Image (cartoon, coloured by chain):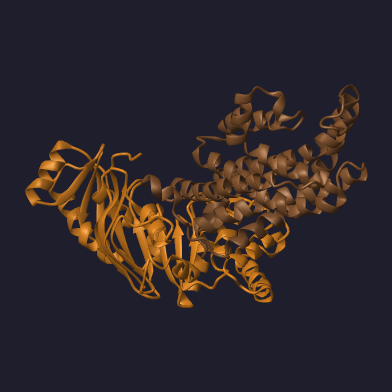
Chain colours: A brown, B orange
Amino acid sequence: MRACDYFALPGVSSKSLKVWQRNKDVFMKDIKLNFLPPFIEPLLYLVALGFGLGRFVETIDGVPYAKFIAPALISISVMYASFFECSYSSYVRMYYQKTFDAIIATPLTIEDVIAGELLWGATRSVINTTVMIPVIALFGLIDIRYSLLIIPFAFLGGLLFAAIGMCFTAITPNIMSINYPVLLFITPMFLFSGTFFPLNALPEIIQYFAIAFLPLTHIVNVIRSLGYGILELSLLFDLIWIIVVCAILLLLSINMMKKKLIV
Amino acid sequence: MIVAEGLTKYFKDLVAVNGISFTIEEGEMFGFLGPNGAGKTTTMRMIQCVSPVTSGSLKIFDMDSISHPREIKSLMGVVPQENNLDMDFTVYENLMVYSRYFDIPREEAEKKVEELLDFVQLTDKRDTMTESLSGGMKRRLILARALVNQPRLLILDEPTVGLDPQARHMIWDRLRLLKKNGVTVVLTSHYLDEVEKLCDRLVVMDYGRILVEGSPSSVIEEYVGSGIVEAENYPELLECLNRREASYEVIGDLVHIYTNDPQQIAEYLTMKCPISKMSARPATLEDVFLRLTGRRLRE
């Protein structure tokens, strides 16, 4: 496979929705358990950080601390939901459960399977966001007019992290090794993407690094703006960054998985 | 139904299938035999359109395996070597979810699934998660799953591996029934009695090549003869056999004498040779297999 083959347009068909449906059916079997984390987690963070730690923090850019971190919590959930779905969970389905092998014996191709997995990963982000928004809105921490726009945006953000997760699934030699990208990429993003303190508190070089290479930075910018109900032109830059990187990584992840699985 | 010409598969520098050609007719039951690493599973995976052909041509239902994988796969059922049932679902759900991959309308699928559960005798287990099924039940469910799209061609890679005799017989019985209904069946197996019983024609593969092709009886006849006389190995016996130019093989402290007329050989041995023990039996596919592929263990 030559380098440019990794960015070739894969032959994905609408049959990838069958894979999405399969994953949705499994999710629905344990719906109560699956709905619990996005419901409980923001509450824990809000109480501990927003209302606990927040009492010792002055307002950030004139915004109370709880209100500052509420959109970041949604962003982090967008990241976690799709990244973990398309890394650990996809790996389990691919390697241990042989689900992909079974599906490609039908008219579906491996490209359809991976596309379905990515769509499902993004859907997990949407589900989490949809559960979290009312909870957070109940505390009056987000602008209810614009916050509904967060839901479709969560799909785009979800696709981005789904593709990132899938790229790691394609190169990881075993399931334990997925811990490396979690430790070296996901966790730093959780902390250094303008989530719990503004990016401009960091040295300038790190700020630029975060803007260039940490996708969560852009997700947080967009969701925070929507949460505050203030739309600025600079969001366009974040959106374009997300769309371009997302498109590249989607192609890359499908082609990498194809190379890994089709021998 | 399947036509392969010069079919070749490389894994990097390793040649797994080395320019094989074969034709499988509609309605036939066709077997692929060979030791581990002979290239059987690779050939099966190319027929299933999940492993790309390196060179040569492979046509299934008159369609090229590279350019029409979706169309070919929609007409084919596959029983893989490894159990890959969806363990997130019950027996019933496994078949329903699988039907969906073939775009089978829901009502039609429900009807077909009931029919298939009955066909493989798993109706009682419909709501069981697949993890709790026994090995035989899993294999039966996989057979049912391979039939949800009413395939014209069924590919089975070691369908009865690890099963008890009851389960094996049940699967054989079902395969015969399918064949009777006009389904073309292609299988690989290490159980040579299975292939001898079931298959109309077979090939023996080794090192990526086809060594022989034909019906089980013709292959046995041609490569070992209809009977085998087993005797204890003495140097004098071998001399005796050499004098008669008999076809034989020494296997440890046994000598296998291949013949079309066991009685004649037996008489000759008792009359002319110093022999203590011997027995005659009909030749089997296993004798052909070992004769062609040797007795050395394979990885």
Using the image as rendered, state which of residue B154 and residue B231 is in the foreground.
B154
Question: What residue sits 58% from the left and 48% below the top?
Answer: A246
Instruction: Identify which residue, A194 or B172, lies in the foreground.
Output: A194
Q: Quadrant of the C terminus of chain B?
A: top left
Residue closest to the far left: B243
Whether residue A32 is visible here, answered yes or no, is: no
Q: Is residue A82 above or below residue B45?
A: above
Quadrant of residue B49 within the rendered picture: bottom left
User: In the rendered view, would you say B276 is above or below B261?
Assistant: above
On screen, residue B275 versus residue A152, left or right, reads left
- Report the side of B31 relative to A136 (left or right): left
In front here: B8 or A160? A160
For residue B219, above or below residue A195? below
Image location (x, y in percent) of residue B111: 67, 75
Residue A179 coordinates in the image, percent (x, y)? 61, 30
Q: Quadrant of the N terminus of chain B?
A: bottom left
Count of number-bearing discs: 0
Horizontal and vertical percent position of residue A10: 48, 57
Task: Name which residue lies at 67% across and 37% down.
Answer: A217
**Residue A52 shows in this picture:** yes
Residue A115, x across and y down, in percent: 57, 55
Q: Quadrant of residue A74?
A: top right
| Viewer-side residue, B288 vs B231 | B288
